[in-house]
Amino acid sequence: MDFKGQVAMITGGARGIGRSIAAQLAKQGADLVIADVSEETAGEASRELADLGVRTMAVRLDVSRSEEVSKAFEAVMKEWGRLDILVNNAGITKDGLVLRMKEEDWDAVININLKGVFLCSKEAVKVMVKQKYGRIVNIASVVAFMGNPGQVNYSASKAGIVGLTKTVAREYASRGVTVNAVAPGFISTAMTDALAENVRQEMLKSIPVGAFGTVDDVANAVCFLAAREAGYITGQVVHVNGGMYM
Ligand code: NAP
């Protein structure tokens, strides 16, 4: 893959899976916009990723707030005048069984995970349609397909992303803009590392390849879909889950 001369914006790009996606894109030449809710961590990530030899900029935004999203995209266009790749990665969890889930926890997860993807995609599409080129990759989850007790808000938000992906893909396919999703399974992060050993072993039994995924496994799939060469793939979900859902 060669992303030289292309600008990629990664929401929630300061850490975790988003940070790995940013690094992989940069290693293949993409200039980076690290868009994150914390100005400090976005700035830190942006400075560190510049060591990979690409241009980087940090923008602070809460993806669920339309004014902040608009301003962030304006800043990118003012600075670099184009946007080729948007990775909608920012996401949160606020778990609880449906009977105990607070309305505010439902709203927070839907607003950041789903409305955030809508708001950022809307801004990106405006730019990409003018350029007659763009790649949008949305980060969903295996729980959109399997459900998961305690994650009614999260699984609904991720299932919503799948519908949104297919619709925006259909709307802009003829304008050079592809829209796809990556659905990770259990990925080794600080969250899974903190699990008790017996819980980890139980989870591993449900994964045919017998291991948790890595952030790079997700980033590789994102890079594939973000490439110019993937132009005939749109409205699809790539599952990165070691076979736990087929
Ligand atoms: P993470 O480590 O918590 O990182 C998420 C990033 O998003 C953080 O930098 C966070 O900033 C930022 N963020 C949170 N709320 C935001 C907002 N309103 N606006 C902008 N940025 C915001 O999460 P992750 O594990 O890397 O997950 C990344 C994506 O993959 C998420 O969409 C998640 O649902 C999905 N996913 C993860 C797994 C997994 O096993 N980890 C599995 C399936 C899907 P702060 O840290 O400052 O809050």
Image (cartoon, rainbow, N blue to C red):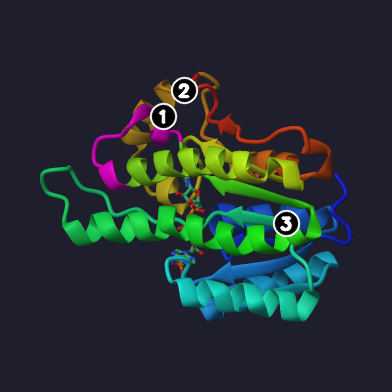
Q: Are marks 2 and 3 in contact (CB under 8 Å)?
A: no
Task: Tell me which numbered mark, 1 or 3, is placed earlier along the sequence.
Answer: 3
The image shows residue 160, relative to residue 102, as above or below, that is above
Residue 145: assigned label: 1
The image shows residue 66, relative to residue 17, as above or below, that is below
Foreground of the two, 231 or 32 = 231
Q: Amino acid at mark 2?
A: Tyr
Which of the two discs, 2 and 3, sits closer to the camera? 3
Residue 105 in the image: state x and y as whole percent: 24, 58
- The stretch in magenta equals 142-153
- Which residue is label 3 attached to? 129
Q: Is residue 167 magenta?
A: no
The quarter of the image holding the N terminus is top right
Classify mark 1: helix, strand or loop.
Answer: helix
Task: Tell me which numbered mark, 2 or 3, is placed earlier along the sequence.
Answer: 3
- Which residue is label 2 attached to? 245
- Location of residue 148 (image quadrant): top left
Residue 47 seen in render: no
Which residue: 17% across, 43% down? 97
Foreground of the two, 53 or 163 = 163
Which residue: 48% across, 38% down? 162
Residue 19 in the image: state x and y as whole percent: 62, 59
Q: Is residue 149 magenta?
A: yes
Q: Amino acid at mark 1?
A: Phe
